Image (spheres, grey):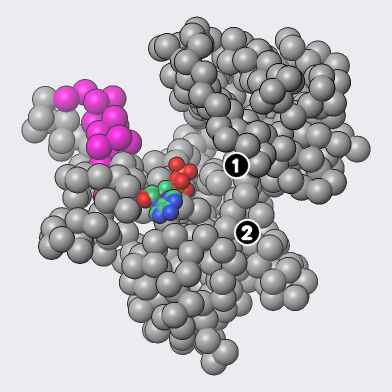
Amino acid sequence: MKILVINCGSSSLKYQLIDSESEKVLAKGLCERIGIDGRLTHTPSGKDSVVLNDPLPDHEKAVSLVIEQLTDSENGVIASLDEIGAVGHRIVHGGERFASSCIITDEVIEAISECSDLAPLHNPANLIGINACRRFMPEVPMVAVFDTAFHQTMPDYAYLYGIPYEYYENYKLRKYGFHGTSHSFVSKRCAEIMGKPYKDLNIIVCHLGNGSSITAVKNGESVDTSMGLTPLDGFLMGTRSGSVDPTIISYIAKKEDKTIDEVMDILNKKSGVLGISGVSSDFRDLQKGMEEGNERCKKAIEMFAYRVAGYIGSYVVAMGGADAICFTAGIGENTSIVRELVLDRLKALGVTWDSEANKKRGEEVKLSKDDSKIDVYIIPTNEELAIARETVALVK
Ligand code: ADP
C-alpha cells in the first residue's frame, strides 16, 4: 500500500509518499511560504529535485500542487490518486484525549480542534492539512499520529507541575511531551539492535535537533520526558530557552518594557544556543565558530551538552537504571562534539565509549565499549516512516 505522510505547519507542508511493503520513499517534498508567495520542492526517488515557484495562497492549493507533482507524467511516481491507500497526518498536540494514533473522523477532528488551545501554532495548521487532503481524497482513509501520544503513559508525579492542582483540573496544565513518534521509533529500534525484548529494557532517547527532547522509556513506555505543556520546556535548543526560572519572564517584561507575549516570543525564537552565541541556532555554525575561537559559540555548545548529560543522569534514576542511551535527530546523529561532551560526563555512570566510533555520523553506530555499564548508540530517527507504519496498522 502507498501511504502519503503529511506534516503541515502554519506556512509549510512536508510530504513523503512511502511504499509500506518495501518501506521505500517513492517521493518527498516541501511546500514553503504558503500564504506568502510559495515554493514547492519535489524530489522523486532517484531523480533530481524540481522546484516550482507557483503561488501558494493556502494549504489547499499546496495539497493540489503536491498531488499534481505525484501524478505528473515526468516527475510523478504514481499514475493516479487511486494508488494512495491512506494518508497519515502528523498532529502535534493530542492533549489527554489521544494516547495512540487513530483513524480520522469528524469526531476526531473536533477533538484535535479542542486541543488547539494547548498548541495554537501547530494544531490549527495540522487541521488545515487534514481538511485540504479530505477535499481532494474524500474516500481515502486518514490517520492522525500525535507527537504527544507516546508520553501518555507518564505517571502523574512526573507530569504534574508544582502549581495549584485546580489548574490541572480546570485547564489540563501538565507536562505532555513531544517528539513521541521519534522517541518510540528509536527506542524500538534500539531494542531490535540489542536483540532483547522491548518490554525488558530501560532506554533513554536523546532527540537532539532544532527542537530537542529527551525521554525515559521504561519497559517500552515513556515514563518521563523533558518537554512539557509545550515544546518550550526542557533544556536550551536552537532558539528556545528551555526551562528558566519563571521570574525571568516578569523581570524582562519590566526591565525592557515588554508584554508577556513579547517575552515569550524571545524565549521561543531568540534564545537557546542562538541567544547565547549571538551567531546561529545551527550547530554546524556553532562548531565552526568554536573552532575559530569564538568563546560564546563554545559556551553554547557546553551548556547544551551539560544539560543533556543532566537529563540522562536524572532519567537513569527515574527508571532505576538504564540499559541504553540513544542519540538521534540532526545534532544527535551528526554532531560528534556534542556527543563527546555528553559522553565525557557519563563516565560518572560507568559509561565507556569509543572515540573512533563517535566520529561516524548519520548511521546506526554503537558508541559504547563492551565494558560500558550502559550501551550507547547513534540511531537515525525516521518520523515519516513511523507515521506510515502507524497508518498502515490502523487502516489494514
Ligand atoms: P528539526 O527537525 O528540529 O528542525 P534537525 O533534527 O534537522 O532539526 O536538526 C537540526 C540541527 O542538526 C542543526 O543544529 C544542525 O546544525 C544539526 N546538524 C549537524 N550536522 C548536520 C547534518 N549533517 N545534517 C543536518 N543537520 C545537522
Please indicate whether residue 105 sits to the left or right of residue 268 in the image.
right
Is residue 63 on the magenta stretch?
no
User: Identity of the amino acid at label 2?
Assistant: Val
Q: Quadrant of the N terminus?
A: top right
Q: Place residue 294 in its image quadrant.
A: bottom left
Please indicate whether residue 227 sits to the left or right of residue 23 in the image.
left
Q: Place residue 220 in its image quadrant.
A: bottom right
Q: Which mark is residue 148?
A: 1
What residue is drawn where x is 35% and y is 77%?
345
Q: Residue furthest left?
A: 255
Q: Place residue 143 in its image quadrant.
A: top right
CA gap, disc 2 and disc 1: 15 Å
Q: Which residue is mark 2?
A: 186
Image coords of residue 72 (percent x, y): 71, 19
Is residue 267 on the magenta stretch?
yes
- Which of the pair 380/240 is nearer the observer? 380
Q: Main secondary structure of the magenta part?
A: helix
- Which of the pair 47/268 is nearer the observer? 47
Whether disc 1's CB lies below 8 Å from ligand 1 is answered: no
Within-10-Å neighbours for mark 2: few <14, some 14–19, many 20+: many
Q: Measured along the vertical axis of the image, is residue 172 above or below residue 350?
A: above
Image coords of residue 252 (percent x, y): 15, 35
Residue 194 seen from this side: yes
What residue is drawn where x is 29% and y is 30%?
265
What residue is drawn where x is 51% and y is 24%?
51
User: Identity of the amino acid at label 1?
Assistant: Thr
Q: Which mark is residue 262?
A: none
Q: Which residues are magenta?
A: 258-274
- Which of the pair 313/137 is nearer the observer? 137
Please indicate whether residue 301 sits to the left or right of residue 146 in the image.
left
Q: Residue furthest bottom?
A: 371
What residue is drawn where x is 41% and y is 12%?
36
